[in-house]
């Protein structure tokens, strides 16, 4: 087994290669350059219809029977997403009989359906991984990095949480167990009708490769 300092160093190298290194120090104030200010989460989530790795089409607003919906931003080869998989499976198991739906969304332009399906097989992911081919869903969500999690209340289609799954993983560091399980806490609050303990937290992950929309490129050229 790797000693902890060496394991942390190897994780840091892997994260850097995969585009998962932490942001450069901001030239402006931290508040102005944080993920929160750069991509604020909307209050409501728009409907979408996306195809998963098995070819099945999933429509968000059709999931009215769910008590809560968990959406996780996914990226093929992202070390943080891969390392969070056991934790995600644990949360799925925790809420398996409580009518909570779990799905992943891949907005990376370079990740093909074939690559996504292979990743799901390799990591035994028993949940839909939806391909956001035109990146519109990821943009509307305000996602910036993979491993960001959104918890949706289908009663109002409100995003009640946007942040990491838990506090176990971060850039170059990995704890044996999480001290705080954000998503589990939020789901328990939603299902019991209690106040949601957290609305927004910064999440670590790999930068999602959003491309500039064609109409924006045309406007830039015209200007």
Image: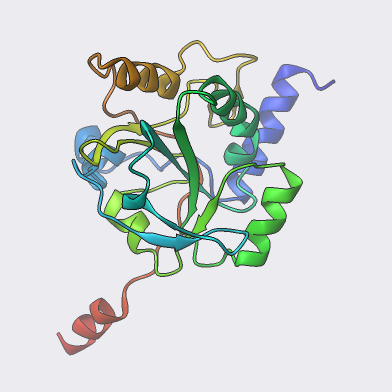
Q: Is residue 130 shown left or right of residue 182?
A: right
Residue at (33%, 28%) from the top-left corner?
201
Residue 34 at least partly seen: no
- In front here: 41 or 54? 54
Residue at (62%, 35%) from the top-left corner?
12
- In front here: 55 or 107? 55
Q: Quadrant of the N terminus?
A: top right
Position of 73 relative to 177 (above/below): below
Q: How is the image coloured?
A: rainbow
Q: Position of residue 185 (x, y in %)?
A: 39, 16
Point out the residue furthest to the top here: 179
Q: Is residue 83 shown left or right of residue 208?
A: right
Q: Position of residue 168 (x, y in %)?
A: 54, 21
Q: Quadrant of the C terminus?
A: bottom left
Residue at (46%, 37%) from the top-left corner?
101
The quarter of the picture where residue 178 lies is top right
The quarter of the picture where residue 15 lies is top right
Position of 55 relative to 84 (above/below): below
Total numbered labels: 0
Point out the residue furthest to the front here: 65
């Amino acid at each position: 087994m790797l000693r902890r300092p060496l394991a942390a160093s190897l994780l840091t190298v892997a994260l850097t290669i995969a585009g998962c290194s932490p942001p450069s120090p901001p030239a402006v104030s931290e508040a102005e350059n944080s993920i929160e200010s750069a991509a604020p989460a909307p209050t409501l989530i728009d409907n979408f219809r996306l195809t998963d790795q098995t070819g099945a089409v999933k429509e968000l607003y059709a999931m009215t029977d769910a008590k809560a919906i968990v959406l996780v931003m996914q990226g093929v080869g992202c070390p943080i997403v891969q390392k969070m998989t056991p934790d995600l499976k644990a949360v799925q198991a925790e809420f398996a009989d409580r009518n909570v739906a779990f799905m992943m969304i891949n907005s990376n332009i370079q990740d093909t359906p074939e690559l996504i399906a292979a990743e799901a097989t390799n990591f035994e992911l028993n949940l839909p991984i939806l391909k956001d081919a035109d990146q519109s869903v990821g943009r509307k969500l305000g996602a910036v990095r993979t491993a960001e999690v959104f918890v949706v209340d289908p009663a109002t289609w409100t995003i009640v949480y946007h942040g990491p799954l838990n506090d176990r993983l971060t850039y170059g560091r990995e704890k044996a167990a999480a001290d705080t399980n954000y998503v589990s806490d939020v789901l328990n609050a939603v299902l019991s009708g209690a106040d949601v303990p957290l609305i927004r937290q910064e999440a670590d992950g790999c930068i999602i490769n959003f491309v500039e929309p064609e109409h924006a490129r045309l406007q830039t050229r015209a200007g």
